[in-house]
Amino acid sequence: MWNRAYEDSALPIDNRQTISQPYTVAFMTQALNISKGMKILEIGTGSGYQAAVLAELGAEVVTIERHPLLSKKARTLLDSLGYAVTCRIGDGTIGFREGGPYGGIIVTAGAPDVPEPLAKQLANGGRLVVPVGSREDQTLYRVTRTDEETWKAEDLGSFKFVPLIGRSGWDESVTT
């Protein structure tokens, strides 16, 4: 895949997953409006690319991956590059309450609906960037928590992601 490294396209990685195209990573990162020291939860570690971008911008990053192999490979790579990213293995659709509340949450897989457990882990003023829709195509939303029980959703356009699998995502046994 070295010959495709500079393409602006999604590329395959292990476990039938993909690394998002660079434009998508940049667009989603910008939508979070990160400030140095902000606590960010990433759902879907994949290769570790998005986590590295977030850490490079000065965020305190916790990333969750459901595939142990991907998580271990990403942790090894991120550590070797000097990024202090916390990598966890588990169901990202329920988040990581112990690390929150978060100033930003970024979901790198398409969900059928906004995962409520993630929205509830946002700090007041925090932003959740999540693709929502069918398994085939999604609309990217930025959900901002305005107070304890209120959120504002903004449509950021159409995108395509691998499905978000988990308790508050798609059922793994469904293939279409």
Image (cartoon, rainbow, N blue to C red):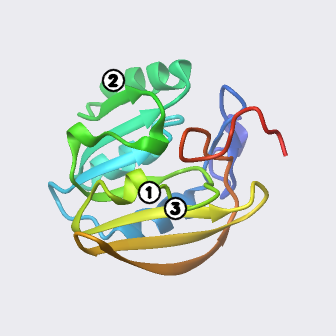
Q: Which residue is mark 1?
A: 116
Q: CA distance from mark 1 to mark 3?
A: 6 Å
Disc nearest the viewer among 2 and 1: 1
Is 102 left, or right, of 131 in this rendering?
A: left
Hey, which residue is sitting farthest right in the picture? 176
Residue occupying the point 63% across, 44% down: 5
**Disc on the earlier residue, 2 or 1:** 2
Relative to 84, residue 79 above or below: above
Q: Secondary structure at mark 3?
A: loop
Q: Are marks 1 and 3 in contact (CB under 8 Å)?
A: yes
Q: Which residue is mark 2?
A: 80
Relative to 175, residue 73 above or below: above
What residue type is disc 3 on? Val
Q: Position of residue 90 (x, y in %)?
A: 45, 28
Q: Position of residue 131 (x, y in %)?
A: 58, 62
Q: Position of residue 6 (x, y in %)?
A: 63, 51
Q: Secondary structure at mark 1?
A: helix
Q: Position of residue 56 (x, y in %)?
A: 29, 49
Q: Which residue is mark 3?
A: 114
Disc nearest the viewer among 2 and 3: 3
What residue type is disc 2 on? Ser
